Image: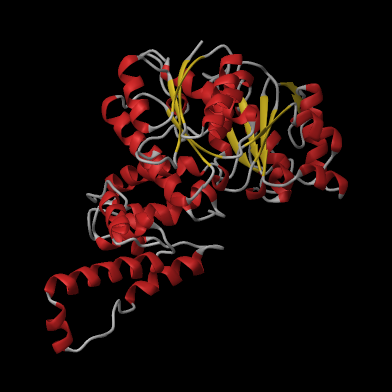
Amino acid sequence: MASILVVDDERSMRDFLKILLEKEGNDVVTAENGKAALDAIKKYEFDTVVTDIRMPGMTGIELLEKIKEDLPDLPVIMITAFASPDDAVLAMKNDAFDYISKPFNVDEIKSVIESATGKSRKTPQTVKPSESFPGIIGQSREMLRIFDMVKRVAPTPANVLIYGESGTGKELVAKAIHDHSKVADEAFVPITCSAIPEDLMESELFGHVKGSFTGAIHDKPGLFNEADNGTVFLDEIGELTPIIQTKLLRVLQEREIKPVGGTRIKQISIRIIAATNKILEEEIAAGRFREDLFYRLAVVPLRVPPLRERKGDVPLLVDHFLKKYSKLLDKEIQEISSYALEVLMNYDFPGNVRELENIIERGVALENSNIILPESLTLYGANKEDHETDQSSQAQPLFQTVASEEELYDMGIEHVLTNLEKRLIMHTLKKTDNSKMRAAELLQISFRSLRYKIKKYDIN
């Protein structure tokens, strides 16, 4: 049983979540606003807080900030009916556990809360999921599912077929499966099928004997032989020719290989993990991939989500790559501006994690200050034009003269400055498409100060 605090100004939502979570055996306390929530936190010890973002008085983001000041390890889940990039970036920057938009799926929020309560109860000796899988950065619910699947399938000898777009980290997942398997101390042999010429593929995989073809001046064991008792990772499996597909099927069925030009058959014990960015079912329908081989490979199918489906991991990945390339390039850059981070949060990353890493490496190399600014980001793909248009607009003049010198003196300095400040804020909000976070950064004031001024000047 977990102890959960639910914060929402709508009574119907508080009651709904209370009933839902208590049915799962949890102890639920509700609060109608941020102040009541902080009072409850002083009285009780909670495993997780679930809070709405848009609330009168103290917002959910402000509540998150206050909670993290005193209880940095307490998981806070943000929910909202008005999803926006501003809220998502602020939530993740303030270390929210997750961010969910209303209306949400019941199973979804139950899964997120289960993950959060599990995280809050971990002992100090237990590592975070991503720390169990070197090289894989992520704490989104999508990645938590991947980690869980890896742990479940790794101890078994079942073959695994990993689906995913280019750049999502399929090889890292394959290596994680191997490292958590019973043959972790044996060889892990990665093979990129598209990188081996067709006429050399059979020799590279299964080996050859001396004199079997021109250039075969000595016996060669082959990559499958090197992986005996370990794991073979076949990346881009959809690129295999029909002949090699047939030979690979025999390896899977009989657990034996025969080198090119040889007569002796060798029994081998290997686990095969394959990966593809193609939809193999479509390849089967088109006659380009064997259906029987597909079923042998896909005993356990596993899909690695593209980065656009797990945007909550972007800040974590950015932080990781910043540290990595600041050290490699001997730079003192450990931070990214909130505006630059928002640009990344709004980008779809057609090249996925590999593209994000490239963007950050280039940004670190180009940046002259100690913080990554939007000007140092070079984005490719669907969002590039919007990004460039947004940045080029910064060069436009903010104001034109609207009063003579005499009129300005008649107004008085306080009135002039007040009107100037109001117009500057209105102009900046328009320029940033009403993004208060970006506007605050351009104006070089805090988000809280900007919000106060907007209210003061009654800016809609």
Residue 188 in sight from this viewpoint: no
- Residue 407 position (above or below residue 236): below
Dividing the image into 4 quarters, which one contains the C terminus? bottom left
- Horizontal placement of 23 versus 35: left or right? right
Residue 249 pos. (x, y %): 80, 32
- Where is residue 454? Give x, y as percent: 32, 58
Residue at left offset 50%, top offset 56%: 347
Q: Is residue 453 visible?
A: yes
- Quarter of image, res 272: top right
Depth check: give the residue in front, 438 or 41: 41
Q: Nearer the viewer, residue 60 or 310?
A: 60
Colouring mode (rainbow / by chain / secondary structure / one colour): secondary structure
Q: Is residue 81 left or right of residue 284?
A: left
Residue at 33 percent across and 76 percent down: it is 395
Residue 458 vs residue 182, the one in the foreground: 458
Say which residue appears at 58% left-offset and 45% top-offset.
Answer: 306
383 vs 407: above or below: above
**Is residue 138 left or right of 274 when viewed as pictured?**
left
**Quarter holding residue 368:** bottom left
Residue 409 pos. (x, y %): 12, 82
Counting labels gives: 0
**In-image side of 387 versus 19 (left or right):** left
Q: In the image, residue 66 lies at what x, y percent?
A: 29, 32
